[in-house]
Image (tube, rainbow, N blue to C red):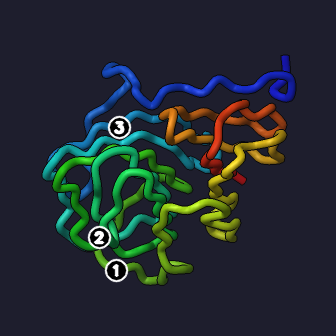
Amino acid sequence: MTGAESAPVLQSLDVPDDRWLELTIPGSAPQVRLCRLHADPVSKASVSLVRFPPGWRRPGTGHYLPAEEFVVLEGSIEVIGTHRADDYVYLPPRTVRTDTRSDEGALVIAWFSGVPEWVDGEPTVAAPQEPVALDARGVLRADAPEVPGEYAVLADGLSGPLHHDADVLDLEARLWGWLPAGAQPPAGHAPLHVRAWG
């Protein structure tokens, strides 16, 4: 059976404990919990669930070399502003972050456009655009040279296969799935967050 013949099954974001890893995000404390949902073997782009415990903090200044996008599922986190449940945030490559924190704790689904390499201090080359933070519908991030693909929230869901690999997120049902190019989209899910990977 090919991807065009069947729709992928979406998985619950309430994942069992044995799928989580504890790790330290550079320059921060305490440890976070991470559950990898998908990683591209070529570009090293990835999507993961990240649980920040109450009181998590990275007090320094620095930046990631790749872009990061995230949606807050629970709680709140301060990364260039305060973001709460259902908020979408796009941080272009090399976006400077200072005093990142989560006082109450948070659960986010986060995408990195490459290996999430943290660099202390200011970048030598500025970020290609300003960060985006909002709770909206439509195209939230368009395709760009440094970050291929786009991120959109589709009020009516997907009506047919996509030309690129993508992952889909149904926030209301707390479901996520990987959608290979040409695969039938999952039915009955709207609004639907769609992140095209290429």
Q: Amino acid at mark 3?
A: Leu
Q: Nearer the viewer, residue 36 or 102?
A: 102
The percent coordinates of residue 34 (x first, y second) are 35, 37
Residue 74 seen in this snapshot: yes
Rounded to the nearest whole Å, what is the CA distance between mark 2 and mark 3?
A: 22 Å
Determine whether, in the image, residue 61 is placed left or right of residue 128. left
Dot 1: element:
loop
Near mark 1 (Cα within 10 A), the count class, few <14, some 14-19 or many ≥20, is: some
The residue tagged 3 is 34
Please state which of residues 162 and 39 is positioned toward the viewer in this rendering.
162
Residue assigned mark 2:
120
Q: Earlier in the sequence, mark 2 or mark 3?
A: 3
Residue linked to disc 1: 122
Left or right relative to 192: residue 120: left
Position of the N terminus, as image quadrant, is top right
Q: Which element carries disc 2, helix, strand or loop?
A: strand
